[in-house]
Image (cartoon, grey):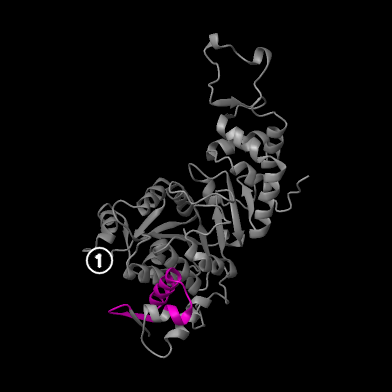
Amino acid sequence: MITDSSGALYHAWLASAALPPETVQALLDAYGTPEQVFRAVTEGRIGRRPKGPERRSSTEGSQETEDEETNATADVRLPAAGLQALRQNAAEERLKKTEETLQQHGIRAFTTADPEYPEELLEMPDPPAMLFYQGDLRCLRGRKLAMVGSRAASYDGQRAAGKIARELSRNGIEIVSGMADGIDSASHSGCLEGRSPTIAVTGCGLDRVYPAVNTRLRDRILENGGLLLSEYAPGERPEGWHFPFRNRIITGLARALIVMEAKIRSGTMTSVRHALDQGKDVFVYPGDPASPNYEGNHQLLREGAIYFTTAGNILEDLGWLDNPGIIRQNSECSGGATESSSPEEAAVIKALTPGKLSFEQIAEKSGLVPAALMSTLTMLQIRGKVEALPGKIYRLV
């Protein structure tokens, strides 16, 4: 017999079928909780066709299609593949493995009926029916702004994002982003340096880190009172279509959206569409007009987005300059009074202490693999700790 010691086992089971949010919500409305849906499925009360006069014949023009089955006690239709997945994943061996994953990673969950569920998301046209989380839910009570931009962002764009996020964080503002490479990572890191918590919404299960190079960033977010959210079940891979869909949660949580760097055709622009659909303000950083990385920015500005260059511009436009946020700041957040904010950064700073070194020399002295070293050097440059010289030579500032 499986015990739901994590409090999220049946949430993960229900999410494992990858049903549309509206279908999951219909099941929850009909049965109350994920555990009650589980009982209905395992007891055969979902998928059993009505008997007698309740089941109309095909001559009445309402025979069920082959790819759907009907719940006998509520008008909820499930795709046959989804119902099959739920039945398969209800096996005790699979439930035990899921429970072990939840326990190992400290993953919990809530639905729209739970008091923890963010009120901001309930105002969306398509809120996630369930959310999985790691970290401190008190983050949801604070003032939040979303920051998004290109994964392949320019150095200037990442540095600007880090600076803006840091200044907003020092004013008690939490940054919501997607923990991707580029602007997302710079925004989360800047928020941590400003000593406010940050919220990351992922496009995969919370037992995975995507991209893997951001494992340390994930840890820093959790260590410093932050929060990770996902509507995807543990074990769910980071599929490409997850991310544009995930973006509606990033914008939905926030008072406004900040666009730092975006091409015309990019995932960032899907965030803009979500924000506009949700009635949110969109602030756009001007960037270099000659750079293709900022084509989306300038198109948005021409179409009426809010121009800004400093965190003060945003705070003033939102009326938050003279009305500080109530969220606590973390005195232990990395990057405040310490020289480095992670073991990787400490290793790079130690390696560079004698003077200038090439990328290869830093890798050899620090022991970091190239992907981790490049990410660490980028963050140190954004924070103004390291300077890049011609020929992939680096030195401390």
* Residue in the foreground of this view, choosing between 144 and 272: 272
Check the picture and name the quadrant holding the N terminus: top right
Label 1 Cα neighbours within 10 Å, binned few <14 / some 14-19 / many ≥20: some
Give the secondary structure at mark 1.
Answer: loop
Q: Is residue 220 above or below residue 127?
A: below
Q: Is residue 217 above or below residue 91?
A: below
Q: Residue at x 56, y 35 (%)?
A: 23
Given the current orientation, which residue lies at the most extreme bottom position? 354
Residue 48 appears in the picture as rendered: yes
The reply to whether the magenta stretch includes residue 382 is yes
Given the current orientation, which residue lies at the most extreme top position? 59
Horizontally, residue 267 falls left or right of residue 193, namely left
The reply to whether the magenta stretch includes residue 375 is yes
Q: Amino acid at mark 1?
A: Asp
Q: Which residues are magenta?
A: 363-392
Q: Residue at x 45, y 53 (%)?
A: 251
Horizontally, residue 23 falls left or right of residue 34, namely left
